C-alpha cells in the first residue's frame, strides 16, 4: 500500500496495531472516533469524500458551511451549505462551529451539533477539511483520527490545481502557496494515504474508519 515515510499503513491498523481496544474483546465504546481527512487543496479530498458518500452511505460525512459561491453542479446542502458572511460570522460568534478556517478568500466551517450527535450515536463520522481546521480538531478532540491525503507527486498536484479551470490565476497561485505549506505538515497526522487512485484511497479510508470504531 502507498504511505509516505513515517506514516502508518491502514493494514497495520487493521491488524490491530493501533486499534483502540487492543487484540482482545473490544471494550464497550459509547461514542465513535471522529475521522478527519485533510491535505492540500486539489489533492482530491472532495473526490474521495464524494466516492465514499456514494459507496458507503453508512459513513456520515459532515456538510460544511462556506461563504464561497457554488460551483456549477454543486447543490446547497449536499457539497456545502452556502451562506453569506453575516450568517457565517453569526455561526462563529454563537459557537456553532466545531472548527473553521479562511481559505483563498472564503470561509469554511464544520457545524458542531451534527458531528456531536453522530459520534454520540457511535456512528462512523468523517470531516473533509483543510489543515488549519484539522489542527483545531486535533486540539479540541484529542481522540480524533487525522488522515493526510498526499498527492503522488508535486507535479501532479500542480496539474490538478491548475487544471480545474474554474478559478482565477490569482486564486490558483494562492492555493499553490498554501499547498506547499500543507505538504510539509504530513508529519502532524496519524496516517498518510497517497492518492494514486480514488478507489484505493476509499478502500484504505474504510479500513481505517472501521478499525477505530
Ligand atoms: P473548495 O473550495 O475547493 O471546495 O475547498 C477549499 C478547501 O476548503 C479544501 O481544502 C477543503 O478541504 C476545505 N474545507 C471544506 N470544508 C471545510 C470546513 O468545514 N472547514 C475547513 N477548515 N476547511 C474546509
Image: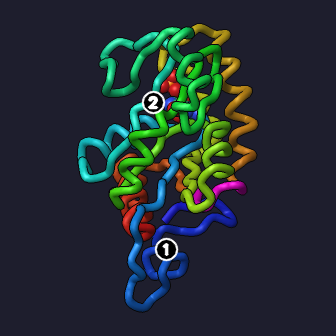
Per the image, the residue denoted by label 1 is 13
In this view, 122 is above or below 158: below
Q: Residue at x 68, y 66 (%)?
A: 6
In this view, 202 is above or below 82: below
Q: Earlier in the sequence, mark 1 or mark 2?
A: 1
Q: Residues within 10 Å of mark 1 (few under 14, many from 20)?
A: some
Picture coordinates of residue 149 (x, y %)?
Answer: 55, 48
Which residue appears farthest toward the bottom when viewing the image?
A: 24
* Residue 161 visible in the shown view: no
Q: Secondary structure at mark 2?
A: strand
Magenta-highlighted residues: 187-192
Q: Residue at x 60, y 31 (%)?
A: 100
Picture coordinates of residue 57 (x, y %)?
Answer: 24, 47
Q: Is residue 208 left or right of residue 85?
A: left
Out of 53 and 7, give the one closest to the viewer: 53
CB of mark 2 near ligand 1 (< 8 Å): yes
Q: Secondary structure at mark 1?
A: helix
Picture coordinates of residue 19 (x, y %)?
Answer: 49, 76
Q: Residue at x 44, y 47 (%)?
A: 116
Q: CA distance from mark 1 to mark 2?
A: 28 Å
Q: Which mark is residue 177?
A: none
Do the residues under discs 1 and 2 have CB atoms within 8 angstroms? no
Please identify the quadrant where the C terminus is shown.
Answer: bottom left
Per the image, the residue denoted by label 2 is 64
Out of 29 and 35, give the one closest to the viewer: 29
Foreground mark, 1 or 2, reads: 2
Amino acid at each position: 500500500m502507498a504511505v509516505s515515510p513515517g506514516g502508518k499503513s491502514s493494514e497495520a491498523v487493521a491488524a490491530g496495531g493501533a486499534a483502540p481496544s487492543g487484540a482482545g474483546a473490544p471494550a464497550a465504546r459509547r461514542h465513535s472516533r471522529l475521522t478527519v481527512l485533510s491535505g492540500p487543496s486539489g489533492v482530491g479530498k472532495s473526490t474521495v469524500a464524494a466516492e465514499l458518500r456514494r459507496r458507503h452511505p453508512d459513513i456520515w460525512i459532515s456538510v460544511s458551511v462556506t461563504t464561497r459561491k457554488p460551483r456549477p453542479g454543486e447543490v446547497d446542502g449536499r457539497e456545502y451549505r452556502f451562506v453569506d458572511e453575516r450568517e457565517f460570522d453569526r455561526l462563529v460568534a454563537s459557537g456553532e462551529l466545531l472548527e473553521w478556517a479562511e481559505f483563498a478568500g472564503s470561509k469554511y466551517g464544520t457545524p458542531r451539533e451534527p458531528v456531536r450527535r453522530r459520534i454520540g450515536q457511535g456512528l462512523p463520522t468523517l470531516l473533509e477539511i483543510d489543515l488549519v481546521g484539522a489542527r483545531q480538531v486535533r486540539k479540541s478532540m484529542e481522540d480524533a483520527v487525522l488522515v493526510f491525503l498526499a498527492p503522488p507527486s508535486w507535479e501532479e498536484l500542480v496539474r490538478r490545481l491548475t487544471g480545474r479551470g474554474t478559478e482565477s490565476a490569482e486564486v490558483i497561485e494562492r492555493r499553490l502557496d498554501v499547498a506547499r505549506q500543507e505538504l510539509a505538515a504530513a508529519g502532524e497526522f496519524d496516517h498518510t494515504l497517497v492518492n494514486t487512485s480514488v478507489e484505493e484511497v476509499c478502500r484504505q479510508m474504510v479500513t481505517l474508519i472501521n478499525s477505530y470504531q
